[in-house]
Amino acid sequence: GDEVVQLYVQHMGSKVARPKKDLRGYRRITLAPGETRTISLPLPAASLAYWNADTHGWVVESEPVKLQVGSSSADIRLEATVNVVGKGQ
């Protein structure tokens, strides 16, 4: 059957308010019963940025970001935390 794989990010040290689970990518795949498959979901650094109204520019913060993968925001099956190094920080 069809399965939808969803990628969420959670900013762990942001200086601005961010959603607890922010959908950053998804992919629908078809699997046979019992089949498993490895897929890739791109996550460009720019997709982690927020708009800074003071500097009139996009900012990627240096902070830990939790990556969560599942079939929905309520069904997370895999988690990992990565350390993001923002530009100029």
Image (cartoon, rainbow, N blue to C red):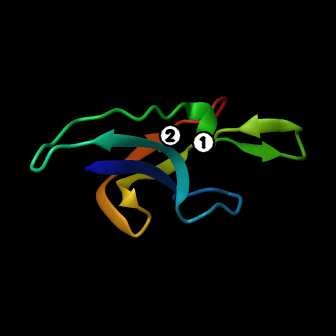
Residue beneath the point at 34% across and 66% down: 75
Q: Amino acid at mark 1?
A: Leu
Residue 12 position (above or below residue 6)? below
Q: Amino acid at mark 2?
A: Val
Circles 2 and 1: CB atoms closer than 8 Å: yes
Q: Nearer the viewer, residue 68 or 35?
A: 35
Residue 47 position (above or below residue 63)? above
Question: Disc 1 designates what residue?
Answer: 48
Estimate the x, y position of residue 79 in percent, counting from the top left: 32, 55
Quarter of the image holding residue 59?
top right
Would residue 63 be found to the left or right of residue 35 on screen? right
Quarter of the image holding residue 37?
top left
The nearer-to-camera label among 2 and 1 is 1
Residue 8 position (above or below residue 49)? below
Would residue 60 be found to the left or right of residue 1 on screen? right
Q: Nearer the viewer, residue 14 or 27?
A: 27
Would residue 34 be found to the left or right of residue 28 on screen? left
Residue beneath the point at 40% across and 70% down: 74
Would residue 42 be found to the left or right of residue 76 on screen? right
Estimate the x, y position of residue 23 in percent, counting from the top left: 54, 52
Estimate the x, y position of residue 21 in percent, counting from the top left: 52, 61
Which quadrant is home to the C terminus? top right
Q: Element at badge 1?
A: helix
Residue beneath the point at 23% across and 35% down: 38
Estimate the x, y position of residue 55 in percent, counting from the top left: 88, 39
Question: Disc 2 designates what residue?
Answer: 84
